[in-house]
């Protein structure tokens, strides 16, 4: 086996694991423009089975399930990506700062312990009900507040041994500022942890944002939203299962594919096996 062949195999495996996430996210983003029917116009009987006019049948008002499925993922994807970026970035910085400044680290951990006691659903309701008209932004704020405490625990544990490395101690002894130590010395060495954490927080954000949609504290009817579709059509699942199964499967596949992509992009640590000559 040549060196080129050996090098192509890991790249191919990584591309295979990343491709589903790219396809699903891309489809969710362009979905509103390729939907075959308007999302708020009935095209068939309520809970009708799939036909040539509506491949996945109709929902509780006779609207095309396929069109609403294509249009209902964009806001969920964008909100989940924003939550994952904010949570991961905030936790990475706080964890790195806490590793360099133990007093700050202990304070951050105590605050995280308190916030972790707050149930997710209760936090969503508290934030959204206290922010009238907040809509999706209120849900994003609640998801960030809920996600940071768990994430900062992980990043703090990963940053602690890095902060004790000789090159970091040498930079600190040389008079380098805190932000230099965090940005230039610690965070670049947490890339694997940060990418893995991003995948996990995206999955958590998808389910949290979807839960908010199911509780109708985010998007409101007649908006097209995957979680809202599940809630609206659950009564007719025996008449047209696709109205519930399709958006539910879309949520699960989105979370799974992005998590796999983040794991594939994370640098592989540990000793690699040496091929037998």
Image: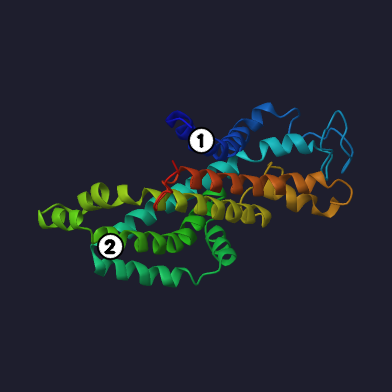
Residue where numbered disc 1 is placed = 9
Circle 1 residues within 10 Å: few <14, some 14–19, many ≥20:
few
> Cβ–Cβ below 8 Å for labels 1 and 2?
no
Q: Secondary structure at mark 1?
A: helix
The answer to which image quadrant residue 97 occupies is bottom left
Residue at left 70%, top 49%? 228
97 left or right, relative to 254 = left
The answer, for residue 221, to whether it is visible in the render is no
Q: Nearer the viewer, residue 108 or 169?
A: 169
55 left or right, relative to 160 = right
Residue at left 32%, top 54%? 93
Q: Position of residue 263 (x, y in %)?
A: 50, 48
Residue at left 86%, top 28%? 52
Residue where numbered disc 2 is placed = 99
- Residue 100: assigned label: none
Figure coloring? rainbow
Q: Of the residues under marks 1 and 2, which one precedes in the sequence?
A: 1
């Amino acid at each position: 086996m040549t060196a080129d062949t050996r090098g192509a195999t890991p790249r191919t495996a990584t591309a295979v694991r990343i491709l589903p996430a790219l396809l699903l996210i891309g489809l969710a983003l362009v979905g509103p423009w390729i939907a075959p029917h308007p999302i708020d116009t009935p095209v068939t009987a309520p809970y009708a089975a799939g036909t040539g006019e509506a491949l996945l049948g109709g929902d509780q008002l006779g609207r095309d399930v396929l069109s609403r499925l294509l249009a209902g993922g964009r806001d969920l994807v964008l909100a989940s990506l924003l939550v994952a970026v904010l949570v991961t970035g905030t936790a990475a910085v706080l964890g790195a700062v806490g590793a360099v400044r133990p007093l700050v680290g202990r304070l951050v951990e105590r605050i995280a312990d308190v916030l972790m006691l707050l149930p997710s659903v209760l936090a969503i309701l508290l934030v959204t009900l206290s922010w009238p008209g907040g809509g999706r932004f209120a849900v994003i704020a609640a998801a960030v507040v809920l996600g940071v405490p768990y994430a900062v625990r992980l990043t703090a544990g990963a940053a602690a041994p890095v902060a004790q490395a000789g090159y970091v101690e040498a930079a600190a002894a040389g008079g380098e500022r805190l932000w230099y130590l965090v940005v230039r010395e610690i965070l670049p060495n947490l890339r694997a942890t940060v990418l893995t954490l991003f995948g996990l927080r995206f999955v958590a954000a998808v389910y949290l944002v979807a839960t908010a949609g199911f509780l109708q504290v985010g998007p409101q009817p007649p908006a097209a939203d995957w979680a809202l579709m599940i809630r609206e059509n659950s009564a007719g699942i025996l008449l047209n299962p696709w109205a519930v199964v399709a958006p539910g499967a879309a949520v699960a596949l989105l979370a799974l594919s992005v998590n796999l992509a983040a794991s594939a992009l994370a640098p592989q640590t540990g000793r690699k096996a040496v091929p037998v000559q």
